[in-house]
Image: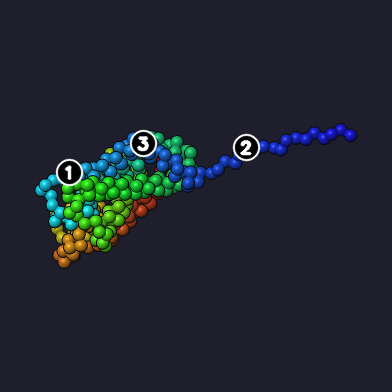
Amino acid sequence: MSAGLTLPPAVGLPARRGTTLGRVVAAEWSKAWGLRSTRWVVAVMVLLPAALAWLGGNDPLVGPDGYGSVAYYVTSTLIVTQFPMLLLGVLLGSGEFSSRSAGPTFLAVPSRTLVLVAKALVTTAVAALTATLTLGLAAGATLLSDLGPGLSTALTPETTRMWVGSAAYLVAATVFCFGLGMLLRRSTTAVLVAFVVFVLGIAAVVVPDALQPVLAALPGHAATLVPATDGFLELLRDLGQLPVGAWTSVAVTGGWALIVLAVAAVRLRGRDV
């Protein structure tokens, strides 16, 4: 009786995993940090407030009485120092369209909505990390300056609003600018629109009272309210110039971010890249 021929078990090709959200997020995270523009803008955003805090803190003409707390001293410059973050959002949203490299991305990931969600999540994470480093380094520079020992570091409802609200606002504003970049697809145009929108949002001190509700509805208005002291907010409320509160203004910025992302998603699905 002849022995039967024993064949090795069949070996198939490994199963190919689909384009899951996790894989796309990982790819977008690598692409975001692989860009020199991302690294440069993040570096400027993190170092600029720290440098301003250090220089101001060592100025003999600057005293602790005008600020009171480290939180107010650091976040009071948010109106000026926020713009690198806004630029970061625009570049993360419009970069691939401006460089005409979006085609390979959508060829590798056919679901355009999945790409948009992944990019938005990466932008949110980059913004949150940058905002945390920015505020933390600026606080450290302040404490190490001559002004630092005279400022309070206590966490009160007011200072917590300044720290947490500022970080939340920076993240929401960055995501809004990301959506603007995805929607307009041209970096220059998106930067110009973002600049106009956010400058209008901080123009509350130079517009008539009748226009205050209009400004309060803009995404950049929170930059003037979140770092403000309780006394200043109470004064604005007494004068009838506070249509929304500080936390509500942050929610307005977040709402605008969601609206722009939704419009960008509709355009992305309906038009060629």
Number of other residues with Cα within 10 Å of mark 1, as a class: few under 14, some 14 to 19, many 20 or more: some
Residue underneath mark 3: 35
Is residue 51 visible in the rendered image? The answer is: yes
Residue found at the very far right of the displayed protein = 1
Residue underneath mark 1: 55
Residue underneath mark 2: 13
Of labels 2 and 3, earlier in sequence is 2
Mark 1 vs mark 3: give the one in front.
1
Number of other residues with Cα within 10 Å of mark 2, as a class: few under 14, some 14 to 19, many 20 or more: few
39 relative to 102 in the view: left or right: left
The residue type indicated by label 1 comes to Leu
Of labels 1 and 3, earlier in sequence is 3
Of labels 2 and 1, earlier in sequence is 2
Residue 114 picture location, percent across and down: 45, 47
The quarter of the image holding the C terminus is top left
Residue 132 picture location, percent across and down: 31, 49
